[in-house]
Image (cartoon, coloured by chain):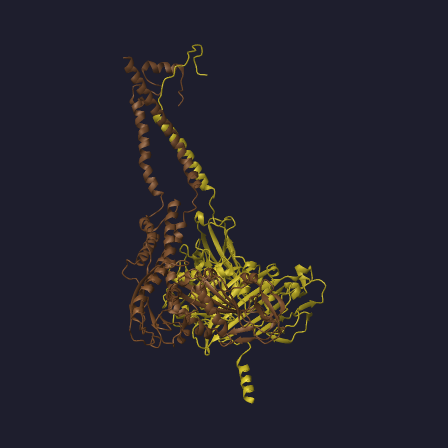
Chain colours: A yellow, B brown
Amino acid sequence: MHLPLALLLLLLHTIPALGTPQNEQFEEHLTLRPLPDGKVHAQFRFITTVSDPLKGVPFDLADREEALHTTLLPLSLTQLLRTYYTPELHLSLNAGKWDPLRWGQPGGALRTGAEMWAWVTDSRAPSGEGEGEGEGEGEGGRWQGLTNGLAGLFCASLSSQMEQRTTSPRLAFRPEGDLPSYTPHKLYHASHPSESICTENLTPFLKLLPCKSRAGIAQLLNPHRAFDADWHGMGVHVRWSNSSAGGETEVRMEVGVVFDPVRVSGGKREWSLKSLFDRTITRSCPAASSSVLTVQLPEEMHELLPQPAKMLSSDGVFEAVYDLGSVGEEMDVGMRWLEDRFDYATVRYTPPELIIRRALKGGSTGLSELSVILSNTRAEPRRVLYVETLPWFISLFLHTLQTEVDGVARDDIIQSISYLPPVSPKPTLLEITLLLPASSEVHLTMQAEKGFIRYTEHQPDASRGWDLPAAVVFPLPLNASSSPAKVAIGGGEGEGRIYSSTLLVDLPTPDFSMPYNVIIMSSTLVALFFGSVFNCLTRRFVVLRMPAEKGKGKAS
Amino acid sequence: MAAVHTPLLEGEAKERGEDVLGLSLAHPVHEDSTRRAIVASYWIVVLLVFPVWYYMTSIERLPLPTERIDLLGQREVQFPIKIDVDLGDIGDLELSRTYPRKLVEDLARLRQGSSGELPPLAFDIAISAGEDPGDPCTDAASGEEEDSYRLHFRTQDAYPMFASCGRHLLIGARDGTDLPHSVGDTLRDLLAPYSNSRLHPPAAESRIAQYSPTYRLAFTLLNEDASVGGAAVGWEIQQALSQYIRPTLAQLSALHNFTIESQVQYFGGLTFDPLGPLSDDDGVESWRLSEEQMSVFVNSAEWTLTSGVSNDPVLHFILFVPSADRRPLYTETRLRLQRNDSFILPQWGGVVIHNPSGHHEGAPNTLLSAHDLAGPFKVFRSQLSALLGVPQFPPQVVTSAWQHKSPITPWQLDALKRRRALENVRNSADALRSIVSLVNQIENMPVGQDVLGQVDGALAALDATTPAASSSSLSQILAHSIDAFTLSSKAFFNPGMIGLLYYPTEHKYAVYTPLFAPVAVPLIVALVREIKAARERRRAAANKQKTE
């Protein structure tokens, strides 16, 4: 009699809440951070992890023709990565103005534009034929296919001018996860500084989430409000790690938005989910194993409603944690301050630890100067890797590289330089390892020359100029003995990367009406010249007998 | 050139016998013949350069083999069919002599066609009698040849009227005196099922997807609204696939290559509200989908049903789980005992509606086990067969027990192969003819070496499908027809051919006119003047001759 009951209990225990054959898990997390100048930084994180004890490798090369079964992972993205043999992919699309002096860093993402890098299995690996190399040469074929696929998936023009934007850095962008060891991989990095993000990019992004924008934290992502903000961006990061329990693939999708309640409400910096996003959370996502909202508490007197379930403190920062796993009716979180109007003058900012300022000086013709100022505000020296990618028409003169520390010229802070000169159409790649002294300002200058580009290669608005991608600074550990290839960059999520702003460079432009002028001029010349010569050759000269008027002798 | 003259200069020049430029009037530069020679030399240069310019501005248009393409319509594919009739233990010798003739007449009628189009079948009938009357079905079905079918007549009562196993057809004759009349009809239903409008109605014809050598099958477990509760959050699809779908795919592997992908969706909202709640006779409330609603069921804007990675055509299979507050959901034309409602969207895929128990909000989420998926996947299997064109098996024929492991009988498979082979041959011939007429019509369309190679390859493959070729079994005809179809599609859709298609002629005139018109006008005017002067001279000379 008890046996069926026992069996039933056993059966119920063996069916987990989500019950997927591979252990798939989806977590969502929203962090709200009020910034010192009255703005609010909202960071959404959607992390899907799949751990498969059977498979040791993520996208097994031999498995490409096998069926692909996904439950929580987005099918389109996974199929794309499998088709092009990519174990690790990072894509960021950001727009707006991020203020690093007041807001800190946007979590390892660039400030403006699109950036994409991936570790692609080398195509000389076994079973390396097939649709992976459609256009382009062998190795570039997979990267080309991957960018085309991502451009189609996210409705962004990521695949334009790929040859002019793709580099393969040697020291930078080390893999954040593990790469399968039985085959070599190659790093491809491309950035599009002038790419903007719009609601058309957010819609397919939300379709990749298990609960889309119908339940859970993603309900808050209102495109109209998100793209009205001062800074907004999204990112997709895929990596694989090889733990003792087998392989684990992690797909992390992020959306970051910086709102300005002071501007919107006209002076007050209180905010709530409803006032920021124009939406509240009404349902919890059934596919999520954990759904958490975290609010970082500022130091001033404030009021947080409703009362949080938990309070955590890490590094001296207090956080209020709300669990959104079971949401009954509407869930709205709000924060209020005691003041009437927000006063910008009373705000104190803590300067960030590393500040980059970059400028390209010079007119549109002649030599220009690239000037980079790296400020280290910490009281101890730091070792950093500075990576600069410039399009092929800007040639740097490396022999003119000069370094100054606090105004004094010094030679010894550059530890290594890796330089790839530009070969049209491939861009320049400059990677410099520097040791920044404590509390100092390091000023790097280099002369650069701007080349002429062809008439058809100019952009439609040629007088605006070209956008130069941001330079990236990677903090390295101080111990210089470890080789750069094995360095773990920042935290597990690449938090330490710091991006500079993009630059605008003015190239000498031709007169675009010249083809018309040439046609007109040559036609006119030909007509006049030919006409004159022909007439000289074929006209007959005759003597004209004029009616004689003897009285008038001279010609009048 | 206007003559600048002054009376003084003119007078002086005339005295000296010169013109105003200081050249003697007798200098050959003033003579008519010189001028004619100059104009003529200009025109000779123009005429010599014209072919060079034409050659350098022409586009590459290699000649297509139009004669061979024109002859394509006259060739016919013939499918060889070998029928061995075993009269078995039918004792009547008389019958054994007349029935062969009757059978041949039946089949001749078959060839002329009763309703619908029959494929061109070339019959080869051999009749034998008095062989060992064993049961061919109990012998192992190994070593069966393609294209050869066997008819066995048996008089024992143990046999039903018509039974089949493998490529054998057993016909049970109750007494040895007369043979069933409908043997010819049954044979027609087995060999050419598409011509029988009862077995294969026009609705079934319109469901069949276009032929493609590769297909992608996308299976989706679509929950309408998982937040209400009672949703299906996962399924044991790998097991269900290997049990129900993969045997069919293995059988169809000669025709198509299949790639499978599957996903689970939690929020697949419908764009309309089903009719309901309606209560039927038992007082059970249910929601219904009308015919119109079934045709707009798929919400392509919101549902991402497939990864768009490759260009292969996709067949979608959706297992739809309605939301817990709108259950159970049935289609309007639901059979009483049928558990899973399903419908096919022609040439696109199929939908099966699964109503799990748990009709209230807050019911626990379930995982669909392979046992739960048995019913839906059997429906998916039959939907897949219908979409790929597998014909219906005639109901009067009983299939033996071991047929159920492999759901498609060899008769159906052969009929499908013949149909697809014919379709491919016709489509590739059409494509080739279209290429020729397009290239003839559009002057700007280039024809490169790769297009020529593909056209030649397609023609060679089409040649190999005719009976004149040495190899002509069904599988080889099918393989060649697939090659021909692939190559002719590649040639037709070759992106290189549309490169210069929209080159506007105004561009050409805009560049050439300001350059060549000022050059051409004096040349033409000079030519016209010379011709007029020559005519005048001839007339004057003729007049002078007359007056002399």
Between A422 and A386, which is closer to the camera in this rendering?
Answer: A422
Q: Quadrant of residue B487?
A: bottom left
- Image location (x, y in percent) of residue B219: 48, 68
Is residue B34 depicted above or below A88 in this figure? above
- Image location (x, y in percent) of residue B443: 39, 44
Work out whether residue A350 can be spotted.
Answer: no
Numbered disc total: 0
Task: Looking at this view, name the residue that lies furthest to the bottom.
Answer: A1
Between B542 and B124, which is closer to the camera in this rendering?
Answer: B124
Q: Quadrant of residue B413?
A: bottom left
Task: Looking at this view, name the residue that lies furthest to the top.
Answer: A551
Is residue A13 depicted above or below A522 in this figure? below
Is residue A56 depicted above or below B297 in this figure? below
Q: Quadrant of residue A41?
A: bottom right
Work out whether residue B89 can be spotted.
Answer: yes
Q: Is residue A462 left or right of residue B191?
A: right
Which residue is depicted at the point 42% across and 45% down? Answer: B503
- Image location (x, y in percent) of residue A528: 41, 31
Between B468 and A309, which is closer to the camera in this rendering?
Answer: B468
- Image location (x, y in percent) of residue A416: 43, 65
Quadrant housing the C terminus of chain B: top left
Quadrant housing the N terminus of chain B: top left
